[in-house]
């Protein structure tokens, strides 16, 4: 190669090296590709996140809602303190304080009656008169016999006195004197017998007039003028009572108190009588006596309660309800739908700290239907769950309904 040609070649090489290469991407092209890859990854990640994140949030929300709904919402009520004196209502039979049938004590015919049913009579007031001609004749004969006996006694006395005087001078024998004295004693005895007979017939004759034995009202008249009257009391016979009289100024009410309340039924206990014909009125009374024995057939204690009836407002024989105010210990009442019957015994669910349930054992007293009496197990300030779930256990979390104040009961079936 020639020298000139070598310089030309070298110059071309230098020129080629100094000229920029338009077809080589270089570092700028690599950086651009990396940025595009990052952008694509970001877009893909954003798409993935935008699809997954709502699901995660929905799952978390569902989990929280499920946990919230798993907590039962309950309604609560507070126990009501029972009154110191407990009132029970029992059926009662109202009877007169004194009642008596009036029978005739002599035979005859009714001459006249002076009191009919409903008549208020006083003690000793004449009710009726009976004609007794046989008794009148017997009394007349007995009085005649009494006069004869008195005459015979007088003669026997004179004879006995004479014989005693003659015996002193031995004018008569001792035997004759004794006979005279014996005749005097016999005449005296006959006189006494005739006097007793007269008094008996006079008593029978006095029964011709029938009087009221006490102040009261005539509740029955079973005879009329001209009726044949037979003496007797009607016991085991066919004799009919003439009148029936009842004293109603004070009434007796007999009540059968269940054995469970018998210890509180003591004389002096207050009571009130209620009748259907006086729906807005009660009549006060007092327990005056008890049978002091439980009837084994009915397991009840018979008690008597006296009720004042000065104006005769109450009628004897009426059916009534007796409200007895029995003294009782401290107790509470609860609705029956708060009770939980478990194998370990009767329980109630109490919201102890405002959000947890606690099952407490209780002891029941009396059953009032929709409510029950609790005699032990409560203090009175508990919030007791109404209609508790059967699956409820102690320590379980609960939520008290927002509309509950702790003193009222919700509607039936509310939980």
Image (cartoon, helix red, strand yellow):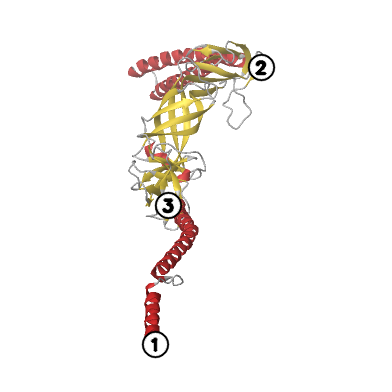
Q: Is residue 249 above or below residue 50?
A: above
Label annotation for residue 346: 3
Q: Residue at x 47, y 46 (%)?
A: 387
Toward the viewer: 409 or 356?
356
Toward the viewer: 350 or 199?
350
Tell me the element at label 2: loop
Q: CA distance from mark 1 to mark 2?
A: 192 Å
Tell me the element at label 1: loop
- Closer mark to the observer between disc 2 and disc 3: 3
The crowding category of the residue bearing disc 1, from other C-alpha atoms within 10 Å (few below 14, some 14 to 19, many at least 20), is few
Query: Circle 2 is placed at which residue position?
Result: 227
Tell me the element at label 3: strand
Q: Residue at x 47, y 28 (%)?
A: 253
Query: Circle 1 is placed at which residue position?
Result: 2
First-in-chain label (1 vs 3): 1
Q: Quadrant of the N terminus?
A: bottom left
Q: Is residue 230 left or right of residue 173?
A: right
Q: Is residue 259 visible?
A: no
First-in-chain label (2 vs 3): 2
Q: Is residue 51 above or below residue 380?
A: below
Q: Is residue 228 left or right of residue 278?
A: right
């Amino acid at each position: 190669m020639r020298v000139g040609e070598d310089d030309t070649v070298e110059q071309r090489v230098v020129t080629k090296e100094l000229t920029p290469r338009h077809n080589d991407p270089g570092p700028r092209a690599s950086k651009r590709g990396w940025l595009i890859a990052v952008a694509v990854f970001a877009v893909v990640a954003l798409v993935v996140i935008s699809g997954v994140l709502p699901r995660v949030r929905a799952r978390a929300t569902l989990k929280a809602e499920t946990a919230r709904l798993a907590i039962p919402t309950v309604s609560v009520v507070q126990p009501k303190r029972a009154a110191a004196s407990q009132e029970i209502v029992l059926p009662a039979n109202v009877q007169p304080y004194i009642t008596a049938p009036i029978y005739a004590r002599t035979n005859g015919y009714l001459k006249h009656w002076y009191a009919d049913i409903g008549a208020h009579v006083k003690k000793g007031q004449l009710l009726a008169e009976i004609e007794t001609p046989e008794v009148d004749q017997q009394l007349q004969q007995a009085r005649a016999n009494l006069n004869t006996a008195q005459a015979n006694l007088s003669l026997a006395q004179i004879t006995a006195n004479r014989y005693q005087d003659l015996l002193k001078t031995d004018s008569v024998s001792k035997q004759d004197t004794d006979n005279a004295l014996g005749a005097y004693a016999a005449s005296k005895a006959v006189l006494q017998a005739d006097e007793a007979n007269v008094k008996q017939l006079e008593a029978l004759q006095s029964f011709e007039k029938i009087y009221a034995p006490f102040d009261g009202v005539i509740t029955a008249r079973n005879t009329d003028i001209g009726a044949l009257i037979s003496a007797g009391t009607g016991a085991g016979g066919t004799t009919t009572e003439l009148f029936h009289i009842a004293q109603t100024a004070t009434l007796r009410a007999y009540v059968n108190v269940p054995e469970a309340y018998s210890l509180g039924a003591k004389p002096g206990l207050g009571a009130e009588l209620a009748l259907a014909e006086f729906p807005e009125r009660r009549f006060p009374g007092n327990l005056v006596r008890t049978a002091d024995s439980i009837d084994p057939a009915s397991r009840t204690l018979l008690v008597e309660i006296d009720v004042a009836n000065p104006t005769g407002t109450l009628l004897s024989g009426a059916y009534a309800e007796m409200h007895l105010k029995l003294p009782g210990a401290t107790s509470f009442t609860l609705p029956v739908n708060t009770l939980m019957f478990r194998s370990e015994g009767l329980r109630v669910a109490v919201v102890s700290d405002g959000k947890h349930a606690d099952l407490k054992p209780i002891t029941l007293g009396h059953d009032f239907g929709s409510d029950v009496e609790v005699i032990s197990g409560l203090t009175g300030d508990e919030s007791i769950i109404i209609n508790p779930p059967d699956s409820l256990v102690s320590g379980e979390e609960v939520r008290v309904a927002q509309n509950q104040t702790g003193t009222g009961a919700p509607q039936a079936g509310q939980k």
